[in-house]
Image (spheres, rainbow, N blue to C red):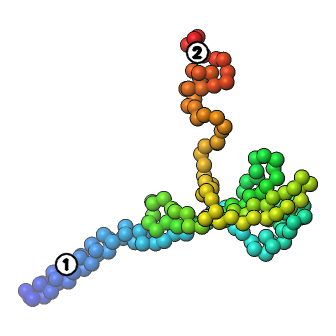
Amino acid sequence: MSNSTGKRFASRSSVAAAILLAGVASLPLAACGSRETISRGYVVNEDALARIKPGTGVEEVLSILGTPSTVSTVGNKTFYYISQKLQRNVQFIEPRIVDQQVIAIYFNQAFKVERVAHYGLKDGVVFDFISRTTPTSGAEQSFLNQLFRGGGASFNPLGA
């Protein structure tokens, strides 16, 4: 093998190695550039929603729209159908909420539709789909605080 052929071969292999190294080094960055859109909750069907008029019975609402995301805790007279759209620009970063829709269906005493309201993200508080806590009335107390102070019961392990 001549000297010029050896230099050409060494030159080509170093270029190939550099390209391979650049490709491997940029591979982890490939996932960073993708924008991900996540949808949660009830997907609003405008045609079905248009069928809900004042006077519609609760059974018919359930058959048209399905089970609500949540129901009012007082009186069970409001159905809430909740959806969110989130975007994440970079993997492993918490997604941000870009849209939220809440369809509230209010019922009267006879459980007939009184009115339908449509709330968006601009109308209020962001709904937490994945809440790990249950809200309670009164002051927040830790388990140990409730245990030693009584928490409504008269048990005290220290005898005081």
Q: Quadrant of residue 33?
A: bottom left
Quarter containing the C terminus: top right
Residue 102: x and y in percent read 69, 62
Residue at position x 45%, y 60% in the image: 93
Q: Which mark is residue 29?
A: none
Taking depth in this image into account, of 8 and 86 the one nearest to the observer is 86
Considering the numbered disc 2 on the image, is that residue within a helix, a strand or a loop?
Answer: loop
Work out whether 29 lies above or below 70. Answer: below
Mark 1 = which residue? 14
Q: Residue furthest front?
A: 123
Are the residues tagged 2 and 1 within 8 Å (C-beta)?
A: no
With 112 as the anchor, is 26 left or right in this view? left
Q: Amino acid at mark 1?
A: Ser
Q: Do we see residue 67 in this rendering? A: no
Considering the numbered disc 1 on the image, is that residue within a helix, a strand or a loop?
Answer: helix
User: Disc 2 versus disc 1: distance between alpha carbons?
Assistant: 75 Å
Q: Quadrant of residue 62?
A: bottom right
Q: Residue furthest right?
A: 110
Residue 130: x and y in percent read 60, 52
Q: Which mark is residue 157?
A: 2
Work out whether 34 lies above or below 69. Answer: below
Work out whether 37 lies above or below 153. Answer: below
Residue at position x 81%, y 58% in the image: 106
Residue at position x 89%, y 52% in the image: 109
Q: Earlier in the sequence, mark 2 or mark 1?
A: 1
With 60 as the anchor, is 47 left or right in this view? left
Residue 117: x and y in percent read 75, 64
- Mark 2 surroundings within 10 Å by alpha-carbon count, few (fewer than 14), some (14 through 19), many (20 or more): few
Taking depth in this image into account, of 78 and 11 the one nearest to the observer is 78
